[in-house]
């Protein structure tokens, strides 16, 4: 909780007893004005852009419990339907924070030449490689279409790596179609195997898709190993100018993540997932129990950044996209975890 304390020194209090009523009222008015200004500053607005999916459970809980407001942050949650719109919106200043696959931050730096930094982790991506019923093995993807959000970032690269490990190459063995976020990929796959045979899907939509007949060939972390999926990234210049605000937000987010992973909050979490994402309660239950709270797969404890998983992100981009001559750069180029570390210190001082 932020407090604005205004104390008058002893000699000022003494003078108040001797000055005229007019002067006393002037001082009181000035003090009240300062107090109002402090109260306004205590609720700084912050626009956060993300995809409408289950990885946002901590945000949903934090908003429901006033966790951000207690640290003087008024969060405005905005949703995107594709990573291209999110990257462009962050660069244009349409919002201050983005939460999605941190590979998008790498793409902004390398492809758009934007000065972006990753400031916290969040999740592993919780993706599964899912296919239509007609696909019995990865080999059956030959001559088929893989649907993705955008073809050169994040989870599309996961899918291409999974298929490459099975001996299949984009362009030679299968086609790639860009359609948008997870619900759009499911819709494309439901139209028929000729339109879209496979895609990377995350919860809760991945569970709903299974109920609708699609099937999973496995979780991404099991098929290709550790992966730093979702995390927060910002423009570096904005972070430098608003460091204290960013740290307070991250401290509140870490608190909200602890709430999300606490068994005592399971029922409320499931209800929020069902209502926020318009999903059946059973789907929300499976999302919470089989994804969000699963070690390595779900929400990262305290939104910690997985450095080894991020090295895998860079290695994947180097291999699949051929960037940096096939040799991934040092991860520090894209990171500034100092804001996260100071946010943790705020929590320790509580």
Image: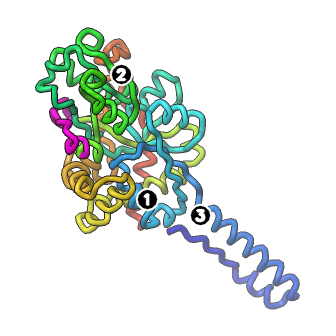
Q: Nearer the viewer, residue 140 or 92?
A: 140
Residue 177 - label: 2
Q: Nearer the viewer, residue 158 or 211?
A: 211
Few, some or many C-alpha atoms within 10 Å of disc 2 (few <14, some 14-19, many ≥20)? some
Answer with mark 3 or mark 2, whichever residue precedes in sequence.
3
Report if the CB atoms under discs 2 and 1 are less than 8 Å apart.
Answer: no
Please provide percent x and percent y for residue 220.
21, 34
Q: Is residue 123 visible?
A: yes
Q: Quadrant of residue 263?
A: bottom left
Please provide percent x and percent y for residue 245.
54, 53
Indicate whether residue 220 is drawn in magenta.
yes
| Callout 1 secondary element | helix
Indicate whether 269 appears above or below 159.
Answer: below
Question: Spatial distance from mark 2 to mark 1, Cα to Cα?
Answer: 38 Å
At horizontal 19% and vertical 20% (from top left) the residue drawn is 141
Q: Left of 315 or right of it: where is 179?
A: right
Q: Nearer the viewer, residue 350 or 245?
A: 245
Q: Left of 319 or right of it: where is 50?
A: right
Indicate whether 257 appears above or below 6.
Answer: above
Q: Is residue 311 visible?
A: no
Please provide percent x and percent y for residue 181.
38, 36
Taking the view exactly as shown, the residue that stands out farthest to the top is 172
Instruction: Give the residue pinned by disc 1.
Output: 252
The stretch in magenta equals: 208-225
Residue 208 - label: none
Q: Left of 58 or right of it: where is 131?
A: left
Instruction: Give the residue pinned by disc 3.
Output: 42
Please provide percent x and percent y for residue 242.
57, 48
């Amino acid at each position: 909780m932020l407090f604005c304390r205004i104390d008058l020194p002893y000699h000022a209090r003494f003078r108040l007893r001797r000055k005229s009523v007019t002067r006393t009222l002037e001082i009181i008015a000035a003090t009240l004005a300062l107090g109002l200004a402090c109260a306004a500053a205590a609720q700084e607005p912050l626009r956060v852009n993300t995809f409408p999916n289950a990885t946002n459970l901590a945000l949903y809980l934090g908003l429901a419990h006033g966790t951000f407001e207690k640290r003087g942050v008024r969060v405005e949650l905005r949703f995107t339907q594709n990573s291209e719109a999110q990257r462009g919106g962050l660069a244009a200043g349409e919002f201050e924070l983005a939460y999605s696959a941190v590979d998008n931050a790498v793409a902004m730096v390398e492809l758009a030449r934007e000065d972006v930094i990753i400031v916290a982790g969040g999740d592993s991506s919780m993706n599964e490689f899912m296919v239509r019923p007609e696909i019995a093995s990865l080999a059956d993807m030959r001559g088929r279409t893989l649907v993705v959000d955008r073809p050169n970032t994040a989870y599309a690269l996961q899918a291409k790596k999974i298929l490459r490990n099975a001996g299949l190459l984009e362009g030679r063995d299968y086609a790639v179609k860009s359609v948008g976020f997870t619900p759009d990929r499911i819709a494309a796959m439901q139209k028929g195997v000729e339109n879209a045979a496979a895609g990377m899907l995350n919860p809760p939509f991945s569970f709903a898709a299974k109920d609708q007949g699609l099937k999973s060939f496995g979780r991404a972390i099991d098929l290709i190993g550790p992966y730093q999926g979702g995390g927060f990234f910002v423009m570096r210049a904005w972070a430098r100018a608003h460091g204290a605000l960013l740290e307070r937000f991250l401290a509140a987010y870490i608190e909200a993540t602890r709430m999300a992973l606490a068994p005592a909050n399971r029922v409320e979490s499931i209800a929020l997932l069902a209502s926020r994402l318009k999903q059946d309660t059973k789907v929300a239950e499976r999302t919470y129990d089989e994804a969000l709270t699963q070690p390595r797969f779900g929400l990262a404890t305290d939104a910690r950044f997985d450095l080894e998983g991020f090295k895998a992100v860079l290695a994947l981009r180097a291999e699949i996209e051929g960037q940096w001559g096939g040799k991934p750069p040092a991860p520090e180029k894209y990171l500034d975890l100092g804001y996260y570390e100071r946010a943790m210190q705020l929590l320790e001082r509580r």
